Amino acid sequence: MDEHVSQSIRWIPSLPLLAGALGAAWLIFGRRAWPRLLICSWHIGGPLAAFASSVWLTWDLATRFAPGERFLVDELGTWISAGDFHAGLTLRLDPLSAVCAMAVSAVAVLVHVYALGFSRRDPNGPDLQRLFSVSNLLLSAVLVLFLVDHPSVALLAWQTLALGGSALVGFRSAKEFHTAAAERFAVLQRVGDLALLLALLALFWTLGGQASPGLESPEIGPGSPPPAGSDLEAGSGELQGPVTAAREAAPSGAFTLVGFLLLASVAIKAQQLPFPEWRSGSVAPVPATAILQSLCLTLPPVYLLSRLSFVFENAPLAGSALAWCGAVTSLTAALAALYASDLRRAFAYSSVSHLGVALAAAGLGAYGAAVYYALGQTLIRPLLLLSGGSVILGLGGETRLDRMGGLLKSLPWTHVAFFSGSVLLLLLPLSAAGQAWVSQPPAGWFVLAAVGGLAVAALTLHTTLLYLRMSTGRPSASPGARLNPSERESSLVFGMGGLAALALFMLWVAGLPDPVGAALGVERSNSLRHFLAPVFGAGSGEFDSRVAAWAASCIGLGFAAALLADGQRRRGRPSWVQRLAPLLGSAAKVQRLDSVATRLLVRPLLSFAHAVRCEVESGLYERGAEAGARLTRGLAQRLAKLSQNGLAQSYLVGSLIGAALLLVYVLRGA
Amino acid sequence: MDGLAYLAERHLLTSIVFLPLAGALALLLLEVSLTALSSSIQRFSALTWRVFGLVFALLGLALAAELWLLFDPAAGGLQLVEHAAWLGDWGVSYYVGVDGISLLLVMLAAFLYPLALLASWGEPSERARHLVVLLSALQTGLLGALLSLNLLTFFVFVEASAVPVYFLVGLWSRRGSGAATRYMRLSALGSALLLLGILLLGSLHAQQFGATNFDLFGFGGAPGLIETELDGAGPWWTAQGFLFAAFAIALFIKAGLFPLHFWTPDATVESPPSASVLLAAVGLKLGAYGLVRFALPLFPLAAAAWAPWMCALGGLGALYAALLAVVQTDLERLVAYWSLSIMGLVCLGIFGLNPIALEGALLQMVHHGLVIGGLLLLSGMLAQRRAISRLGELSGLAGSMPVFAAIFTLLLLSAAGTPLLGGFSAAWLIFLGAYPSAPWLAAAAILTLGLLAVFAFWLLGRALFGALPGGGGRQLAELDLREKLVACSVALPVLWMGLSPMTFLGPVERSVGELLESMQRRGAAGMESGPEAAAQPRPGRGAGN
């Protein structure tokens, strides 16, 4: 396969990086804040240029090359090289990375536009330049993750995402920083980063160590249509050449170990069980949360899984664990979302739950469906968050759900955005299910399907109830007070509208299942799926009617249950969902796992460290040093006594004179 | 000026080594002469000493920059060699030269010295003269040791650097904890062992070859110690286990490596910040550098046989020091233990005995120097504002000191191995290199970095963004221009090292290959002819490529 070189790929991550880095440097060293116009043009221009570049290159990719040859390469040099290890800084654009790059850069642009209006209406709103700088740096990191070729560089980007995410979680306002939340998030993410680091180390030495004298690193993923010398075959994630031999020769447990380490890293990034750091998705201002959810937490984990899919293909146990992890988290977080009384928390839980569905699909081997689902979430989640933010702004900062109602009539544009987001979210499982082609379902798949189905039903129930609660009735917050006219900010409306249009375009036109598209007479109804199909190998483009039917049933069940519950609420009676509060509350309490970890791990570790400091470092060493000093003193005194003896003194003086004479002789001889 | 140009052209390395001390001594001599000539002339002011000290330091930096430009990474081997017989019959010579391994550390020392002097401008001016003279002596000792290719001159320079440290720690001690005495005792013990090893090696060499030789590499046709045709049954070859042990213990003490580290935290905390920078950032490297430069190539079989134990000491030492770091309550002491932890990683990399790990260790040495030096400088700046450095009393610094906060964050995160910063590049190579031979120790090292990162986040959260109970926390003045210059000068290379580590690894690659090739060749020769040899050296995959 020939290499198609394009030096334009580098601009995709570089432009937001330039915008973010200069903005951050000015924040630190500059004395005066930038004018608003400069902030807008600079910080929106960066991601906009990245979006434009990615669109142009994607168009180029789609129109110039045959499906099997759609990849472009841009070699920037070497990042690090030592001995036989060589990590090149090569960017590679294939259909998957192109679509992902377009999605995240578009979301960044629209959220930035929204944030302009949001900050103007919110008296305690975020410092725009700080928010945009962090956001652009984060965007740059995620774009690098999507585009790089070498796992080491991907690791860099992955860890940078965690840092940027921590900064966003801690974002509170211009002057404040939510330290505790950021710290919790950062610590957990760091653990995940180290798990990925270990996974890659093990992977390098499992594959490269046995494959050839060189340390040949596997290129990332099934989707990288690799040029000559690359280790992965396009389309299927199959390893080829020497690495295939290495895979066969590798110890059977090695891939399982790598798989579980990878699972831990991805689960932490995606906030899946048993690492439920769900609160971090609800503490920052709405634009910061939208960036965090869409750029950092949603697409990167699924993308990385799909690129390293060969690990799970060789470690079915780890694959099953991933599927179960996703399914159980999905159900638990959906129940917690039903229990939540705060709009932002409800969004945060629901987001984790949806991501669980995507990870479960990846665990089953349906990477196409997983990526499609995550892509959908990347567009829909910020749409819902932004429209929710508009509502919160309208209510003067009120976030309690029981104070909301009828608001969407007062905020028509927000209503449209929220409605679009809710509908798209309801249909997303159905749309993705059509791609959930699984070649070999694991043992016990029906139990897994049942758990996943329940999760989808609970999510449908939650989305529907949330929409109905917010759109109907009357608001009870600040009775008599006028709503803050947030919709007068055109940039705020434009941000929501743009996202709604984008999500609609992707899901309804480009991702419509074949039968539905054919029935509606929509041409190119499934172009996105067909564009991505070569990346995911055989079968990924096929429509699976059984999975789609199962998803439709679950969605229908959830929808009916929501109508029933809403009817009971309107009649003034406690709904059946409210009666399940103890069960739902238990699901929400899962988040306390971190305090268990603190009790079990952190406190004993700190106690141990204190003991080491007192007993070993101070005690043992001090005693040793004192003993050494006593010994030295004793010897010195003994020598002093000896030297006071006349004989010893004479001997000493004689020796010194002799040594001096010898030295003179030696020096003269030299 | 012609003389200076001649020196820079023909004796560049000698100029680099002796310029700091020569400058300080010249100024001292001038001061003494002038005050002796006329009683109306007073001693030079603190500012004069500082300015002249800085000027000579910057001249040294300029010479080092010239060295960087003149050095040809592709040529390999020793470059810019200078040799002069000293005690010729006894094998002692003034022999300096540079290769990729020493180049990086010389650049580090030359880079940090003016920054340390500049940072010392904020300290009380009573002892400015003493500080400049002692720092210049320390710098000369460090540079001389880094460039020496003769074992005995290496020893002399190492000892020459220990004396000013003793006075710096003793005179500036704030707590009177006897740190200077402890340092001197241990340093003397290490020196005695090192001298014993060197003399025994020389004696055995003379016994075997009929002539004493302490030159590591040959010069003028005479073979150096590591180029001598070996007889595997020869006396010094068979005694290499003992010799290696003597060298290793001595150099572990010099490097402050676990478990012989316990002089370093006190010495770092008690000396003035400007001196502790040179001591922790460059002084500790002498030990690690000695291991790479002398212990590995001279005793390849012993090094290979002891490597697993050394790796264990490095990996576990890193974890041990990290555990101690997280329970410190004093910022400077925290940095001192953090430094020990990173040095543990360096040890792990050195004894990984393959090019990846060794290059990682060398990169980590430079990174350690920059990041620990920077943190000590910053903690000194903070101490000048608050006169305290207790962690519990630091809060909300990001609001009042944004530049300080940004650079402190950058350095601390780099020290914790955060990506895009120098610490990650170095640690990644060490992990990669150490993993095949010691996977559990590599995992322990990763755990160490995790622990440090968690603590870094905790510290940053409280010190920079947090508020003390009751809204405490004083408003502190932001760094002034001089301090910003110092802080940014340290931070920028750390950032650059993360983004483009090849700038630092490029000159090293060939030298490391040659070192491992030499070990492999000599080890194989010793194995063939010496049945006593215990183990095959492990030059690792791709050694000598």
Image (cartoon, helix red, strand yellow):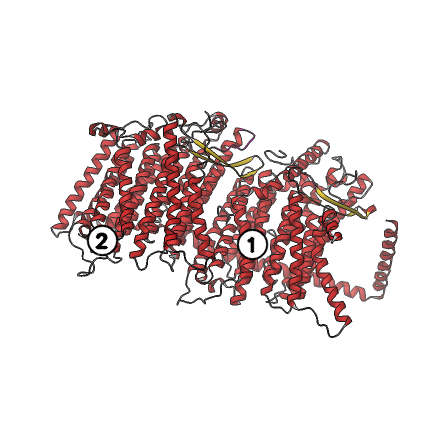
Question: Which residue is outermost to the left?
Answer: A571
How many marks can you see?
2
A593, above or below B239, in the image: below
Query: Badge 2, how many Cα within 10 Å: few under 14, some, many 20+?
Result: some
Q: Can residue A197 be seen by looking at this rendering?
A: yes
Respond whether the residues carrying marks 1 and 2 are from the same subunit.
Answer: no
Mark 2 highlights which residue? A401
Front residue (pair A427, A452): A427
Q: Is residue A214 magenta?
A: yes
Q: Is residue B182 magenta?
A: no
In the rendered structure, the residue with mark 2 lies on which chain?
A
For the stretch drawn in magenta, the main secondary structure is loop
Image position, residue A413 (x, y; %): 22, 48
Callout 2: helix, strand or loop? helix
Q: Picture coordinates of residue A383 (x, y %)?
A: 28, 45
Which amino acid type is shown beneath numbered disc 1? Ser
Residues rendered magenta in the picture = A212-218
Residue under label 1 = B489
What x and y, as percent, mark residue A389?
27, 52
